[in-house]
Amino acid sequence: MHLVKSSARRPFVVGLTGGIGSGKSAVANHFVAQGASLVDTDAIAHALTAAGGAAIPAIRDHFGMSVLAADGSLDRAAMRSLAFSHPEARKQLEAILHPLIRDESARQCLAAQGPYVILAVPLLVESGTYRERCDRVCVVDCPEALQIERVKARSGLAEAQIRAIMAAQASRAARLAVADDVVDNDGTLDQLRVQVERLHRRYIDLAGKRT
Ligand SMILES: CC(C)(COP(=O)(O)OP(=O)(O)OC[C@H]1O[C@@H](n2cnc3c(N)ncnc32)[C@H](O)[C@@H]1O)[C@@H](O)C(=O)NCCC(=O)NCCS
Ligand SMILES: Nc1ncnc2c1ncn2[C@@H]1O[C@H](COP(=O)(O)OP(=O)(O)OP(=O)(O)O)[C@@H](O)[C@H]1O
């Protein structure tokens, strides 16, 4: 009897990344509308830090009750302020969350049923682990001024806080340097959709050729 190699079951994985507010979620939604499976590390991080989430006990032990809301979930605004003004606090938070996010995202990728998987990871360029898992890297790119404008409009965060988050991320140039594909998001949402539809056809083709 032949053992099936685990890699034989591994789906075709497209890593989707981009800076804060670049448009990853908008792009991911367009891929899903085309039929792709989505594994979203931001969503996994949110689930881990919801009330009763698997990361909450370690966060409470490490940071204390001041970073928890009354319902026991992570107080995201409090942690955001702490993490993006104190690099060592961010490293501690990442040390708690990243192994859990890595495991859960790997599990979800293997369970995905679509023709290929979009693995959305804000820190893909910063983390070798995710790049190793991806057959391709797709970068959502837009000018930094537009990132700031969109995040301000979406969440009302102050510009200084948005800049502090951007400073903790890879530069635009570093992301573009590892991109196999680039989605330009300096136009309309319709222009975004057209680019995603073209890439979807390419990924279907590449995924089919690999199996
Ligand atoms: C600090 C937290 C609580 C702030 O929560 P908030 O609701 O404001 O942001 P949210 O989680 O929705 O993330 C929004 C964006 O912030 C950026 N971001 C999040 N975490 C990080 C980080 N560790 N380093 C740099 N940028 C980050 C990304 O662009 C992300 O898309 C949260 O971002 C968090 O738990 N971060 C640590 C987990 C992590 O590294 N997540 C990234 C996925 S691997
Ligand atoms: N081409 C566009 N035109 C107008 N608004 C856009 C466009 N692309 C994205 N947006 C809006 O900008 C905001 C940021 O986009 P989105 O949430 O997709 O970015 P993101 O990269 O997922 O952000 P984050 O890193 O914070 O998770 C959203 O409110 C989104 O609707």
Image (tube, rainbow, N blue to C red):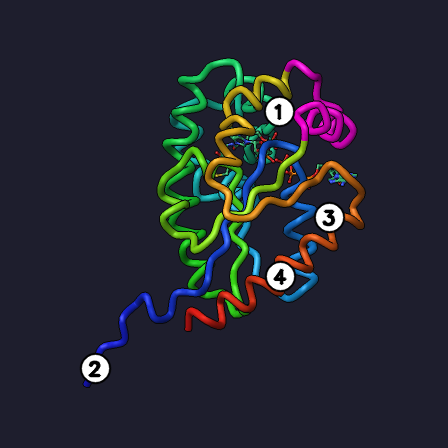
- Amino acid at dot 3: Leu
User: Please, what secondary structure does the residue beneath circle 3 have?
Assistant: helix
Asked whether the beta carbons under mark 3 and mark 2 sit within 8 Å of each other, the answer is no
- In the rendered structure, find residue 192 and report the number of the disc placed on it: 3
- Name the mark nearer the viewer: 1 or 2: 2
Q: Is residue 146 magenta?
A: yes
- Mark 3 lies within 8 Å of ligand 2 (Cβ measured): yes
Q: Is residue 149 left or right of residue 173?
A: right
- How many C-alpha atoms fall within 10 Å of the one at disc 2: few (<14), some, or many (≥20)? few
- Amino acid at dot 4: His
* Lower sequence index among marks 1 and 4: 1
**Mark 1 to mark 4 CA distance (whole Å):** 35 Å
Residue beneath disc 2: 2
* Lower sequence index among marks 4 and 3: 3
Residue beneath disc 4: 200
Q: Is residue 10 magenta?
A: no
Residue beneath disc 1: 77
Q: Is residue 124 above or below residue 2?
A: above
* Lower sequence index among marks 1 and 2: 2
- Mark 1 lies within 8 Å of ligand 1 (Cβ measured): yes
* Boundaries of the magenta span: 143-160
Identified at 53% across, 19% down, the residue is 167
**Mark 4 to mark 3 CA distance (whole Å):** 12 Å
Which corner quadrant holds the N terminus? Answer: bottom left
User: Please, what secondary structure does the residue beneath circle 2 have?
Assistant: loop
- Name the mark nearer the viewer: 3 or 1: 3
Q: Is residue 30 above or below residue 179?
A: below
**Mark 2 to mark 4 CA distance (whole Å):** 34 Å
Whether residue 44 is visible to the viewer of this picture, yes or no, is no
